Image (tube, rainbow, N blue to C red):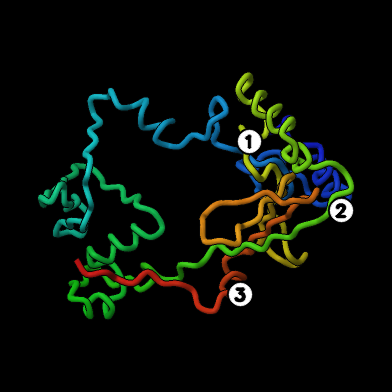
């Protein structure tokens, strides 16, 4: 989004510079600390994903086979403790997928510990209570899953924000036309254009707060319907996310992924 950010976003970065906060031109570089413009996964104005960028281009490779409607149930171990395959259920039938070299477990922050626990990797007492044989006692598997806490602060602006453009039908039409013709503009960008990683106190060893800057703040609806709604006033927002250890202090009790029976 560099070079395409809203002027009020640029003002936020200028304010960080005035406060002598470090500026970071690349959050994926050598250091993460500082303020800057976020990167987005966008191709030709549309949000992309790993399947489109990596998997689909490789579909014609002879060494790639995709099995659909498969639900992994447990890992298979050799006598020496190595994982040699996966036992899974496909369309109701139990199947075994074996590997000659390695098995990569990539089922997410919830699915991965669940699969490990069902395979006997976890807290031995918790597994035994559910009738799962313990293959290796690893109490940390499935523990300390914490909420991604965020506190949003809204500020009235003394200059135009993106809200002003969205407030009129003419502005909405202009932004829509810009996107259709160029695949650029706010409709091709992230809601949060800038932000950074900062230390809550100077004595912190590393950044422990992530900050977002939104030139057109969005508010959660008062109904139960999912989604967002625009803020009716000319303002901007600064959502902040504390570090995990601070989030743990703010949360009544960290969540834990419990073993689930087969």
| Left or right placement of residue 106 versus residue 71 in this view | right
Give the labeled residue for mark 1. Answer: 189
Disc on the earlier residue, 2 or 3? 2
Q: Does residue 132 lie above or below 239 as drawn?
A: below
Q: Secondary structure at mark 2?
A: loop
Task: Say which of marks 1 and 3 sits in front.
Answer: 1
Give the labeled residue for mark 3. Answer: 250
Q: Residue at x 34, y 62 (%)?
A: 113
User: Dot 1 surroundings within 10 Å: few (below 14), some, or many (20 or more)?
Assistant: many
Disc on the earlier residue, 1 or 2? 2
Q: Secondary structure at mark 1?
A: loop
User: Dot 3 surroundings within 10 Å: few (below 14), some, or many (20 or more)?
Assistant: few
Asked if disc 1 and disc 2 are in contact, CB closer than 8 Å, the reply is no
Q: Secondary structure at mark 3?
A: helix
Image x and y of residue 236, in percent: 77, 50
Q: Residue at x 59, y 38 (%)?
A: 40
Numbered marks: total = 3
Q: Does residue 107 lie above or below 199 as drawn?
A: above
Look at the image and tell me in which quarter the N terminus lies: top right
User: Dot 2 surroundings within 10 Å: few (below 14), some, or many (20 or more)?
Assistant: few
- Determine the CA span between mark 1 and mark 3: 32 Å
- Determine the CA span between mark 1 and mark 2: 27 Å
Give the labeled residue for mark 2. Answer: 19
Image x and y of residue 214, in percent: 71, 47
Image x and y of residue 3, in percent: 74, 30
| Left or right placement of residue 107 versus residue 20 in this view | left
Which disc, if any, is residue 159? Answer: none
In-front residue for pair 44/106: 44
């Amino acid at each position: 989004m560099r070079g395409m950010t809203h002027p009020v976003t640029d003002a936020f970065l200028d304010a960080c510079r005035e406060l002598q906060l470090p500026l970071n031109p690349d959050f994926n570089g050598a250091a993460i600390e500082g303020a800057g413009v976020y990167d987005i996964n966008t191709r030709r104005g549309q949000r992309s994903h790993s399947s489109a960028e990596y998997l689909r281009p490789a579909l014609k490779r002879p060494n790639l086979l995709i099995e659909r409607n498969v639900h992994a149930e447990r890992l298979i171990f050799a006598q020496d403790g190595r994982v040699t395959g996966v036992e899974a259920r496909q369309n109701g039938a139990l199947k075994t997928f074996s590997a000659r070299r390695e098995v990569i477990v990539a089922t997410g922050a919830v699915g991965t510990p669940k699969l490990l626990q069902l395979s006997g990797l976890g807290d031995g007492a918790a597994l035994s209570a559910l009738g799962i044989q313990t293959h290796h006692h690893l109490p940390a598997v499935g523990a300390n899953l914490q909420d991604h806490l965020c506190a949003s602060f809204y500020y009235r602006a003394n200059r135009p924000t993106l809200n002003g453009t969205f407030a009129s039908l003419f502005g909405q039409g202009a932004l829509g036309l810009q996107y259709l013709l160029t695949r650029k503009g706010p409709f091709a960008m992230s809601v949060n254009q800038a932000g950074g990683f900062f230390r809550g106190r100077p004595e912190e060893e590393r950044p422990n707060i992530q900050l977002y800057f939104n030139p057109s703040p969005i508010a959660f609806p008062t109904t139960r319907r999912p989604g967002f709604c625009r803020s009716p006033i000319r303002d901007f927002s600064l959502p902040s996310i504390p570090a995990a250890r601070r989030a743990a202090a703010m949360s009544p009790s960290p969540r834990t992924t419990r073993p689930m029976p087969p």
